Image (cartoon, helix red, strand yellow):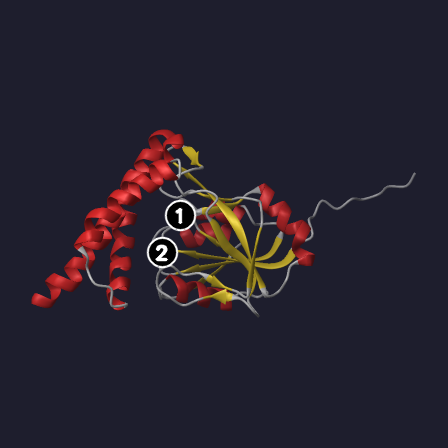
Amino acid sequence: MTIIFVSDQIEKLPLSVVIIALNEESNISRAVSSVSGWVSEVLVYDSGSRDLTVSIAENRGAKVVSGEWLGFGPTKHKATGLASFPWILSIDSDEEVSNELKSEIQKSFASLDERTAYLVPRKSFYLNRWVTHGGWYPDFQARLFNKKFVNWNQVEIHEKVEAASYQKLTGDLNHYVFKNIEHQVATNNKYSSLQAKEMAAKGKNFSWFHFFTKPAFKFFECYFLKLGFLDGWAGFVIAKSASYSVFLKWSKLYEIKELVKDE
């Protein structure tokens, strides 16, 4: 009788998954687990977590490096440079590679173009449902690339992967975006401050017309034009929050341009 042994090990792709993290103990296990076992390296760049992020990531098999926070673009660029492999899959701590995206990357990896950045559709889970309208889906993000030819730019906010060309994939990157409404409000407050500072740095002047019209139009755009109402309660909260975020951005620009200069 001949006995045949079949290995249950999956061949790992020569690919580094890069994750930036700060106090993400509630998310990091899901993110790392979604890529463990089929990629050659999971690198977590931690910028000073005081919770269990580091130990959880290490227990899930990730390589953790510590470094300072430099802003979104510069931090992602630096973390990418620390990866061992040229092919990079960049995900955030609150994201998860779906089985569909995993399978798509595995099947297409050998034919990927080194000078192309691959866009993945990101689907967000919020207020106990997957949000598919209001401008939140498919929310394509450039996340798969070869760092020899493609990389993150180095702006503090609105960072992006810059490439000669882009191509869309179909598998979803799952995004567990906010824990609750309080978390969303806090995030809007943080990002609106960064956006206002960016506008001021670029010489953007405050406009009363935009102050009154842009928040209102943002709600109309998200809730009606982009069919946010089809997402029920979540769609309404998202539209109102987007409107409020725009209001905060312009209010803070006024504070920077008109109030601070008088001090």
Q: Percent from the top left, x then y, of residue 152?
A: 46, 64
Residue occupying image coordinates x 22% and y 48%? 247
Task: State the image quarter where residue 144 is shown.
Answer: bottom right
Q: Secondary structure at mark 1?
A: loop
Disc 2 to disc 1: CB gap under 8 Å: yes
Amino acid at pointer 1: Glu
Above or below 184: residue 84: below
- The residue beneath circle 2 is 49
Number of other residues with Cα within 10 Å of mark 2, as a class: few under 14, some 14 to 19, many 20 or more: some
Q: Nearer the viewer, residue 136 or 50?
A: 136
Q: Nearer the viewer, residue 53 or 124?
A: 124
Q: Secondary structure at mark 2?
A: loop
Q: Nearer the viewer, residue 257 or 184?
A: 257
Task: State the image quarter where residue 157 is shown.
Answer: bottom left
Q: Percent from the top left, x then y, of residue 217?
A: 28, 44
Which badge, 2 or 1, comes first in the chain's sequence? 1
Amino acid at pointer 2: Ser
Q: Nearer the viewer, residue 186 or 28?
A: 186
Q: Is residue 175 visible?
A: yes
Task: State the image quarter where residue 219 is shown.
Answer: top left
Q: Percent from the top left, x then y, of residue 225?
A: 37, 39
- 11 lies left or right of 128: right
Cα gap from disc 2 to disc 1, whole angstroms: 9 Å
- Residue reaching furthest to the left: 263
Number of other residues with Cα within 10 Å of mark 1, as a class: few under 14, some 14 to 19, many 20 or more: many
- Residue reaching furthest to the right: 1
Q: Percent from the top left, x then y, of residue 164?
A: 55, 66
- Residue reaching furthest to the front: 209
- The residue beneath circle 1 is 25
Residue occupying image coordinates x 50% and y 50%? 59
Quadrant (top left, top right, bottom left, bottom right) of the N terminus: top right
